[in-house]
Image (cartoon, rainbow, N blue to C red):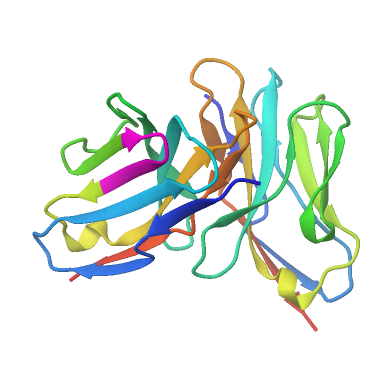
């Protein structure tokens, strides 16, 4: 399979600050990466699709200016939560399409706690 | 609208018993089907996938699933579970039309007890 890595795995930030989460494809190039958010005991909600070299495509209801996504290279996408608030506290997971172009592999996830 | 249904939010089972976790989806057009497992405080790990070919697919950890196009189902099975199989299991479907977004079910928590 393909390996997708996220960093940091856990982060605590103060309300009003910004925090960046990185998603890397370690052994393959990923032109498309996906960012999900998972609420406690809930399923995954697709936030946006990150395309290398172009703007991300956001799902309905996701604030583009709050959740900034950058896909600067074929192996790295970043999610920046700007002006974080306690309600942004959640488990964020990234994923990428593997070499077969269909199978999606997930990172380990990042716990964000805003205090 | 495209949707994925996992009818059981929680399935309790005794160790070494068989288990089936159900997954149904809304449309029978060309689909790719996946099962993922999530252990506590971790990301998602791919268990198995159906892209084409044989409708019975085998995955890791002794799990298997069968694609049933007429019933639009992709149920996950294991003949004998272990305590270590306790986790959250997510069914996911990718429709091969339009944007090809991966849609998840709400998850089924498998609880294996001794």
Tell me residue B107's x, y (percent).
Answer: 59, 53
Q: In terms of depth relative to the viewer, which is nearer, B38 or B69?
A: B38
Residue positioned 68% across, 47% down in the render:
B35
Find the magenta span and give its range.
A72-79
Residue A76 within the magenta-colored segment of the rendering: yes
Instruction: Identify the main secondary structure in magenta.
Output: strand
Residue positioned 61% across, 33% down in the render:
A99
Asked if residue A10 shows in the view, the reply is yes
Question: Against B2, is B20 above or below?
Answer: below
Report the side of A64 relative to A98 (left or right): left
Residue placed furthest toward the front: A27
Report the side of A51 relative to B16 (left or right): left
Residue positioned 20% across, 63% down in the render:
A86
Residue positioned 88% across, 31% down in the render:
B54
Q: In terms of depth relative to the viewer, which is nearer, A34 or A71?
A: A71
Report the side of B42 relative to B80 (left or right): left
Question: Against A100, is B78 above or below?
Answer: below
Asked if residue A39 shows in the view, the reply is no
How many numbered discs?
A: 0
Tell me residue B15's x, y (percent).
Answer: 84, 76
Residue B6 within the magenta-colored segment of the rendering: no
Residue placed furthest toward the bottom: B114
The quadrant in which the C terminus of chain A is found is: bottom left
Tell me residue B101's x, y (percent).
Answer: 51, 29
- Quadrant housing residue B30: top right
């Amino acid at each position: 399979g393909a390996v997708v890595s996220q960093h940091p795995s856990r982060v605590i930030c103060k309300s009003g600050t910004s925090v960046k989460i990185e998603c890397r494809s370690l052994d393959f190039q990923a032109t498309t990466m996906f960012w999900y958010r998972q609420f406690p005991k809930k399923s995954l909600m697709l936030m946006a699709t990150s395309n290398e070299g172009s703007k991300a495509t956001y799902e309905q209801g996701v604030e583009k200016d709050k959740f900034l996504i950058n896909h600067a290279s074929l192996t790295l996408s970043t999610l920046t939560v700007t002006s974080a608030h306690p309600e942004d506290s959640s488990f964020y997971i990234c994923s990428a399409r593997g070499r077969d172009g269909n199978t999606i592999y997930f990172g380990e996830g990042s716990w964000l706690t805003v205090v | 609208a495209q949707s994925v249904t996992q009818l059981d939010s929680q399935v309790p089972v005794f160790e070494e018993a068989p288990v089936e976790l159900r997954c149904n989806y809304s449309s029978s057009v060309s689909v790719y089907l996946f099962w993922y497992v999530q252990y506590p405080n971790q990301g998602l790990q791919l268990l198995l996938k159906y892209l084409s070919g044989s409708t019975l697919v085998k995955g890791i950890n002794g799990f298997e699933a069968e694609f049933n196009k007429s019933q639009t189902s992709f149920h996950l099975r294991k003949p004998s579970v272990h305590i270590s199989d306790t986790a959250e299991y997510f069914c996911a479907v990718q429709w091969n039309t339009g944007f090809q977004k991966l849609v998840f079910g709400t998850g089924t928590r498998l609880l294996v007890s001794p």
